[in-house]
Amino acid sequence: MSQPLAERLRPRTLDDYIGQQHLVGEGAVLRKMIDAGHISSFILWGPPGVGKTTLAQIIANRLETPFYTLSAVTSGVKDVRDVIEKAQKGRFFNEASPILFIDEIHRFSKSQQDSLLGAVERGVVTLIGATTENPSFEVIRPLLSRCQLYVLKSLDKEDLLQLLDRAIHTDVELKEKKIELRETGAILRFSGGDARKLLNILELVVESESSIDSGDSGKSEDLPIVITDELVNRRLQQNPLAYDKDGEMHYDIISAFIKSIRGSDPDAALYWLARMIEGGEDPVFIARRLVISAAEDIGLANPNALLLANAAFDAVNKIGWPEGRIPLAEATVYLATSPKSNSAYLGIDAALDLVRQTGNQPVPLPIRNAPTQLMKELGYHDGYKYPHDYPGHFVPQQYLPDELVDERIWHGQHSPAEEKLLERMINYWGDRFKK
């Protein structure tokens, strides 16, 4: 049986590797380590189909070091210890540490991750972890502190077009067919920056057209397979899951879920929640997205949303499945029906941009800490007005650095709850908050 196209086309060297030039391009950090013949433990964080596993295999081949792989879905603590023991016994003096690649490391339990710590610390293995989840949530701190973190990006249009061209003209099976890529909009859109999904779609479309040709005596095998947007849409509608063999669709569905909440449609939000539940999605993954949505999309328009989302997160952890679907549904409906504001989200992003543009501005002297006599003599804390000593617990004074004193960062939005906050700020600060 033939291998899938995505496997046949898996790159074997960095020169064949598409994308992630910020990590493996000339002069980039990972490229330098690989060229030097020595790498330290690291974790690759990025969406599906961007080359995490492939990159780990290329590194192992390039360094000519033993390569062990574990899947966090199917491996337990015993499997981890067995691999570490093999690596320890098989390593020769002064030889580079074997590489232990753990796919979906975010699914490892705390005890499984703990069992890795000693081996990573002693250099028994060089750990390469791959995850689609934020490692700061899913990887224990001691292990995370011993690994570099590299973020992989979704492939851009040029990367995907390069991959399509390579598949059509170099793959041992596809190059024997006459394939004309007339339109690429649909195939790029459905792939969502995921190389594996792109190749799965291409393979599906080509196989479908080939079977039609071979089954129709009136058609010539010499006729080209012309790939158009209409053809891709038609084939995917007939085989809605065929291009999603490894479960990557959950990123599309979680996107629909969050956008339905943001768009205040509780029916749609519950539908996408049900799709995730029925598809076996991790309930903690769903709960975490609800917490993020509460902070990002509801925000100050209804601060209780964040409290309820956090309560749902805790409840899911405590009661598990299937009862956990109920607090998730409660939080989903509450968030979808709540007024929306992203002023806090926009505010912190604006503040971060300002910090990056202006650098380390000095703290005004009156609001500096003054724990020592020398600091007091230098004027630290001098002139500070304690707001609680004044009517209404407020007194005007400067809190921003001198260079930024006229900057506006937070802009209140027009939900009933937030307009009260904005009105209070205008009463305190006058025209500054009318801008």
Image (cartoon, rainbow, N blue to C red):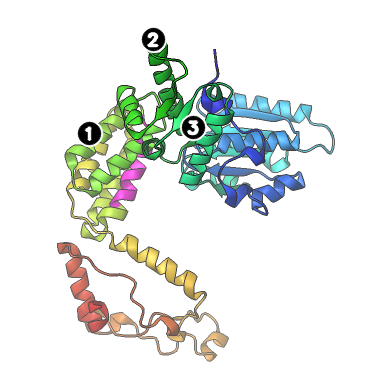
Q: Which residues are magenta?
A: 281-294
The crowd level at tag 1 (other Cα within 10 Å; few <14, some 14-19, many 20+) is: some
Instruction: Return the x and y of residue 208 as percentages of the image width and height.
Output: 39, 19
As drawn, the label of residue 228 is none
Main SS, magenta region, reads helix
| Residue topped by disc 3 | 196
Q: Residue at x 78, y 27 (%)?
A: 90
294 versus 70 height, above or below: below
Front position in the image: 333 or 324: 333
Q: Is the C-beta separation of discs 1 and 2 under 8 Å?
A: no
Task: Assign a secondary structure to mark 3.
Answer: helix
As drawn, the label of residue 215 is 2
Name which residue type carries label 3. Arg
Task: Assign a secondary structure to mark 1.
Answer: helix
As drawn, the label of residue 271 is 1
| Mark closest to the chain's N terminus, 1 or 3 | 3
Task: Assign a secondary structure to mark 2.
Answer: helix
Image quarter where the C terminus lies is bottom left
